[in-house]
Image (tube, grey):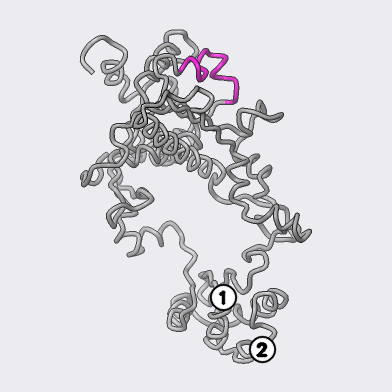
Amino acid sequence: MTGGARQQRLPLEGVRVLELGNYIAAPSAGRLLADFGAEVIKIERESGDELRNWRLYAGETSMLFRTINRNKKSMVLDLRTEEGREDVRTLAGHCDVVLENFRPGTLEKWGLGPDELSRDNPELIIVRISAFGQTGPYAERPGFAAVAEAYGGFRELVGDPDRPPVRTGVSIGDSIAGLYGAFGAVMALYEGLRRRDAAAEPLPVADRIVDVALHEAIFSMMESLIPDLGAYGVRRERTGGRMQGIAPSNAYVCGDGFSVVISGNADGIFGGYMRAIGRHDLAADPDLADNDGRWRRRDEIDDAIGEWTGARTRDQVLAELETAGVPAGPIYTAADIVADPQYVARNMIQEFEVDAGGAEPARVGFPGVVPVLGGKSLPIRSLGPEIGEHTEEIRARFLRPGPG
């Protein structure tokens, strides 16, 4: 597997991370840290992270695993044995951050709680990601992102009002928790630098734990869900392709079967939008001059827009709206994204030769690094590794006497 050439010094070079995590949440945090230069050592059991088999259509390792675990090193250890647990404690002494997403109490049961992991490293940062956090009456409950999305209020708002709630097409709860985990790690690293500059004592272990709950990560994305209830007695409801209280902003089908999203809800845009679709009557209607009035008549407005888009191709719709200064865009498929010049210009699709189960390696595009530094995505240094690919290298550096 090959990728783009290294172009610049990365901001997290010199930071070392020990990842004790399966699936998506903690590994997503590890991916973000690795993307920007941290050395991330991923510990796997002999059979590997379960993610290796998720959406595995051919070959031995899924593209999902290759994506989430890019830029990392894989080491096999058996945490069911005392030898494996002692190796983890030793490795933690050489790391700046430990990431984990086990059920609360699991690491403590194995003798790998924060105190033990900090045995040789009083500045170690420990990022713990779980369904409900490390404290509270639900702390010991198991739970995946789907359950967290329900508890966080997210699922209640996804879908059409006359149908049961649905889920999004990605594990959004895990991914958002991973973002918070990475942010918490960097925040704690910065605090550690400040304390060292001030010659202050290391923080006690309790203050070096970053506690990320999946349901709270989702809840934090829910904008004014709770304040709207408390202030106005408003209970947010599912609105399909619309956003509650905002109009017109929706998805519309074009005459060629493609769909577009049009966000013409700003007061200064609405009049020009309606004139662009030939509805001068709606543009001039004083009842529609503000968002409250438009929301009350949202069905009428959406019907007018849908009639207009249905008589044109997607390209015609987008061209006319661009001329009118109305924000709009196509609803992309994966193939659309790969072909789009904006993604290409910012190096957001990076190709690698990878085993996809065929007789020869396939050239496969992978999503680039976000956020962008220097005008383009940083190059991906390597895809998710083979099981235990770096075990001997890491043993030689940290678990045997010798240089390094």
The one of 88 and 384 positioned closer to us in this rendering: 88
Kindly identify the residue that appears in the image at 70 percent across and 84 percent down.
287
Category of crowding for the residue at label 1, using alpha-carbon neighbours closer than 10 angstroms: few (below 14), some (14–19), many (at least 20): some
Give, as a three-letter code, the residue at label 1: Ala
Q: Position of residue 221 (x, y in %)?
A: 59, 50
Q: Position of residue 226 (x, y in %)?
A: 70, 52
Label 1 sits on residue: 266
Where's the N terminus, which quadrant? top left
- Horizontal side of 356 relative to 330 (left or right) equals left
Kindly identify the residue that appears in the image at 33 percent across and 37 percent down.
71
Q: Is residue 290 visible?
A: yes
Q: Name which quarter of the figure residue 231 lies in.
A: bottom right
Q: Is residue 386 visible?
A: no
Kindly identify the residue that appears in the image at 46 percent across and 41 percent down.
183
N-terminal of the pair, mark 2 or mark 1, is 1
The one of 401 and 185 positioned closer to us in this rendering: 185
Q: Name which quarter of the figure residue 74 lies in.
A: top left
Which residues lie in the magenta part? 103-117
Tell me, yes or no, whether the highlighted magenta stretch contains residue 111: yes
Category of crowding for the residue at label 2, using alpha-carbon neighbours closer than 10 angstroms: few (below 14), some (14–19), many (at least 20): few
Label 2 sits on residue: 285
Q: Name which quarter of the figure residue 359 lies in.
A: top left
Task: State whether residue 268 is above or below residue 33.
Answer: below
Task: State whether residue 191 is above or below residue 291.
Answer: above
CA–CA distance in space, label 2 to label 1: 15 Å
Kindly identify the residue that appears in the image at 63 percent across and 34 percent down.
132
Task: State whether residue 278 is above or below residue 252.
Answer: below
